[in-house]
Image (cartoon, coloured by chain):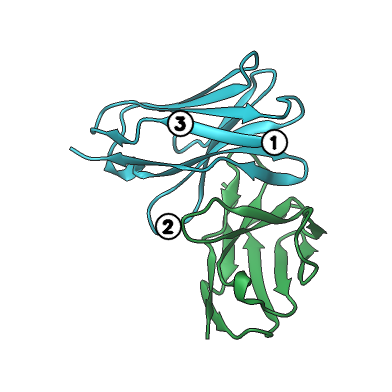
């Protein structure tokens, strides 16, 4: 069974860097985009960006200056880095697999809280 | 950005009802439209991709239609497990990919 499992720090102070990693288990990196999506408490979904197997990335222009998504195909992992976080970055962060048939595989989500 | 607008934002219905949720794109997105269901504390689940294709394992009471700018998600006969929040998503443009604001479906 193909699964995504994500991990990373859940509590940050303003101006720190958010760092999350997502591991793919039981599947292949090829043929998909590997995405990060976030959801502030009680609000809707926001797409952060994605990377494919060749390392090509797409980012949300609203976050692009602070976001880096990288991949490690040898470990079947991809990572999110978001710099200079503020309270507004508090959210549940999801990793996910996007293909031509939609985003059908999601990680379990990580609540990241930014607080002084 | 392509703006996705869902209506209604919330909806009360009863078990057995037929329910329709609408999603409108700010520009044509062909059929690059997906629907998701999300329950509290859980990741979203893919229901429909390509505007009208049912994802594997999704009950046939769910259906999607539309192309261009106007899309609908229909649940033919509501079941207790269908009470959740529903989101549409466009993947026509990845600069950026955008979601609708969500439709909360509640029990009447």
Q: Quadrant of residue B21?
A: bottom right
- Chain with colour cyan in the figure: A
Which numbered tag is attached to residue B35? Answer: none
Question: Looking at the image, which residue is at 63% across and 29% down?
Answer: A24
**Crowding at label 1, few (<14), some or many (≥20) Cα neighbours within 10 Å?**
few
SS label for mark 3: strand
Between marks 1 and 2, how big is the CA–CA gap? 28 Å
Which numbered tag is attached to residue A2? Answer: 1
Question: Looking at the image, which residue is at 71% across and 69% down?
Answer: B72
Mark 3 vs 1, N-terminal side: 1
Between marks 3 and 1, how big is the CA–CA gap? 17 Å
SS label for mark 2: loop
Of labels 3 and 2, the one closer to you? 3
- Counting from the top left corner in percent of width and height, residue B75 is at 71, 74
- Counting from the top left corner in percent of width and height, residue B34 is at 70, 54
Question: Looking at the image, which residue is at 65% across and 17% down?
Answer: A73
Which numbered tag is attached to residue A43? Answer: 2
Between marks 3 and 2, how big is the CA–CA gap? 22 Å
Say whether residue B50 is left or right of residue A73.
Answer: right
Which numbered tag is attached to residue A7? Answer: 3
Q: Chain of mark 3?
A: A
């Amino acid at each position: 069974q193909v699964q995504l499992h994500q991990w990373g720090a859940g509590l940050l102070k303003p101006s720190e860097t958010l760092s999350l990693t997502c591991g793919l288990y039981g599947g292949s990196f090829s043929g998909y985009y590997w995405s990060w999506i976030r959801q502030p408490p009680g609000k809707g979904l926001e797409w952060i960006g994605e990377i494919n197997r060749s390392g090509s990335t797409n980012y949300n222009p609203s976050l692009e200056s602070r976001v880096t998504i990288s991949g490690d195909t040898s470990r079947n992992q991809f990572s999110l880095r978001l710099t200079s976080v503020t309270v507004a970055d508090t959210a549940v962060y999801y990793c996910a697999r996007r293909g031509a048939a939609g985003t059908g595989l999601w990680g379990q989500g990580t609540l990241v809280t930014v607080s002084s | 950005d392509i703006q996705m607008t869902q209506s209604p934002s919330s909806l009360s219905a009863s078990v057995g009802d037929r329910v329709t949720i609408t999603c409108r794109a700010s520009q044509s997105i062909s059929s690059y439209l997906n629907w998701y269901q999300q329950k509290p504390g859980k990741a979203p689940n893919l229901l429909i991709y390509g505007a009208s294709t049912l994802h594997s394992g999704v009950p046939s009471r769910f259906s999607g239609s539309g192309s261009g700018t106007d899309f609908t998600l229909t649940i033919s006969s509501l079941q207790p497990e269908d009470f959740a929040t529903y989101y549409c998503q466009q993947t026509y443009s990845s600069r950026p990919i955008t979601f609708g604001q969500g439709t909360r479906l509640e029990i009447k």
